[in-house]
Amino acid sequence: MPLLYVTDLAYPARGRRYGDEDIFLTARLREHFPLALCHPLDAEALMPGFDAVVVRNSGPVLHHQEAYDSFRAAALAAGTLVYNPLTGRGDMAGKQYLLDLTAAGLPVIPTVDDPADLHLLPRVDTYAVKPKQGADSIGLTFTDTPAGLAGEILIQPRIDFAYEVSFYFVDDAFQYALYAPDPARRWELTPYAPTPADLAFARRFVEWNTLDHGIQRVDACRAPSGELLLVELEDLNPYLSLDLLPEPVREAFVKALVSSLRSFLAPS
């Protein structure tokens, strides 16, 4: 089944090499599937000629929101297979999940979207404020007096965390974890050996998302109390940092991805 692989090879991602990662992945996937690459702005026009669309390192959709919304609507209307499936409840659907998870009492950085609700957050000296439709830290500011239009911003307590850690899954199967020992250098990552409690934490959000197929990255921070708190559930186009992995781990990931795609594409 021919695949349309959506990527922006030239997107200038800070600390990440989108193009290199997708060149590697498409080279490996071509061993198993016929495929062609395209820019996200061309995906809607080209997808009728393919059996499925694989969305990978396509950059924040904020930069092409109208085109992405149109692509998504067209894919849903035509019943086109899209990987990851368009039913994700994490970043694919916006940032509302951070508010929903906060309200449900799950281990997430507490979040509100209205300055009038500031009393619902832990009292801190500084708050992080960012656009609700933002991505990639675009528009992020820190302030002691959060302000903005209700429903259009996210407000979180600024947490003096020890480090950030990311857990990578294909379907519901854990693949590997990476962490940034220096909180000031988010993308200077090194392999991380998760504890059973760490994996239970990450798996809780993968299960909450209810995606049968796809790649998910669960980003968390280690709070001063020692617990992990969810930062982001990336289920649209998570960067994978494959170049930082030992070869056996990278190969195991590719094998898992090929198996997931074959299962996803198989006639029901």
Image (cartoon, helix red, strand yellow):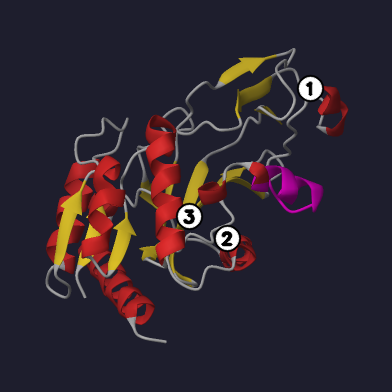
Give the number of the disc on residue 202: 2
The front one of 11 and 243 is 11
Q: Residues within 10 Å of mark 2 (few under 14, many from 20)?
A: many
Label for residue 10? none
Residue that appears at 46% across and 27% down:
184
**Residue 137 coordinates in the image, percent (x, y):** 48, 28
Q: Are marks 2 and 1 in contact (CB under 8 Å)?
A: no
Q: Say what secondary structure mark 2 lies in.
A: helix
Q: Position of residue 16 (x, y in %)?
A: 29, 38
Q: Which mark is residue 115?
A: 1
Q: Which residues are magenta?
A: 97-108
What residue did someone put label 3 on?
235
| Quadrant where the image shows the C terminus | bottom left
Q: Amino acid at mark 3?
A: Asp
Q: CA distance from mark 2 to mark 1?
A: 29 Å
Neighbour class for label 3 at 10 Å: few (<14), some, many (≥20)? Answer: many
